[in-house]
Amino acid sequence: MVTAIGARVTADELLGQYAPGDFFLATARETLLARGVARSFTDGDAVRLSERVADALAESSAALAVGALPFDTAGAPGHAVLPSTVASAPPAHPAAAAFDRGAVGVPVAVRPVPTPELHAEAVAKAIAALNDRDLRKVVLARALDVDFDEDVRAAAILRNLVKDNASGYTFAAGLPGGYSLLGSSPELLLSRRGDRVVSHPLAGTAPRSADPVEDAENAAALLASRKNQVEHAVTVEAVVETLRPFCRGLTVPDGPRLVATPAVWHLGTGISGELADRDVTAFRLAAALHPTPAICGSPTAAARELVGDLEPFDRGYYAGTVGWVDAAGDGEWAVAIRCAQVRGRSMRLYAGGGIVPESEPVSELDETSVKFRILLRAMGLPPEL
């Protein structure tokens, strides 16, 4: 039995209770586990889904709702749940660094989708299409399909993700059709607490290095890169313009700062504002923001169309958003990247990168390889597959 919010439990105990289908979220602020389904909602319209969830929370005694939005509701519906039980604990770190690693097992097959060569060709086509389709940016992803001879040990992977990632948003979310989404995202789409709204978009990437000198050089090169600055600016502009109608005022730094993850450096900009209408929930704001140019491109509709033309798979809930909202409208939603969809004996890992006119196909391919490392490490697999 999962305890109620406010009980004295630890993040380690919540991880021990997690089972596929549950919702789990570990952040620098808290650790959350939601289990069971009191009510569930699916909807192809993200705004309407947020409103249905707000109405359900107002009519019930549920502490909160949890859920996920897909990359594109044309391929999968938004999904939200009023859980049967919810428990929270203090942040997992620093204690999580001492957790034992979970045993995941050895896969029987690993298949890239598409092949690395074909992904590089798709990037070249995307670069050529930017001018033809009047696009500023598009984000292209590739996948790794991994099969096991037994059910994927999702709880072990989640434990390892928490252990390996001291910052960001490590999550698991049950999805329609018996799938689960597991990942550790560095990116906050939207947080609302009272009338304070925060978003922290990331765009622009460079690899980390075990050599401190090389690592510092990579970070400095990222900060100085015109290509990455342009890519980042497109995302920040879109987030600001989307939030502006909802806020009395916004605070936007003059430029991005470096954000470190175990695998990569990112450019990030923290945007904050004062909510004008307290009836606008965190879920409603997340629905308005999603998808940002960080995971889709700009303009959104044309970028989504190009993604559909060039990617040989449906993204599902990859590059969507996962999070929670409570009856007061507060909540927190992370961008669903550095993640995998899991069901039965199979899982699909995803990694993508932003394409602008200055992009180079080989560099973009390398960037996706680096981003896979978060999941590969949690699975006990080599960093390059």
Image (tube, rainbow, N blue to C red):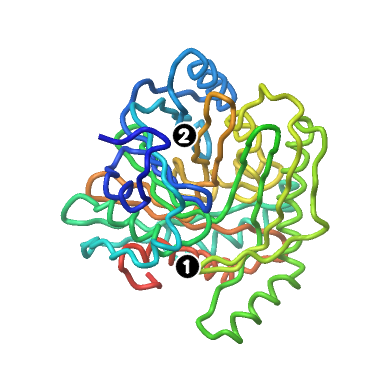
Task: State the residue position of label 2.
Answer: 75
Callout 2 amino acid: Gly
- Residue 225 sits in quarter: bottom right
Can you name the residue that lies furthest to the front here? 8
As drawn, the label of residue 311 is: none
What residue is rendered at 41% in x and 64% in y? 164
Callout 1 amino acid: Ser
Q: Nearer the viewer, residue 335 or 27?
A: 27
Percent position (x, y) of residue 75? Answer: 47, 34
Task: State the residue position of label 1.
Answer: 369
What residue is rendered at 43% in x and 22% in y? 62
Q: Residues within 10 Å of mark 1 (few under 14, many from 20)?
A: some
What residue is rendered at 54% in x and 65% in y? 261
Q: Secondary structure at mark 1?
A: helix
Percent position (x, y) of residue 342? Answer: 32, 47
Percent position (x, y) of residue 322? Answer: 49, 40
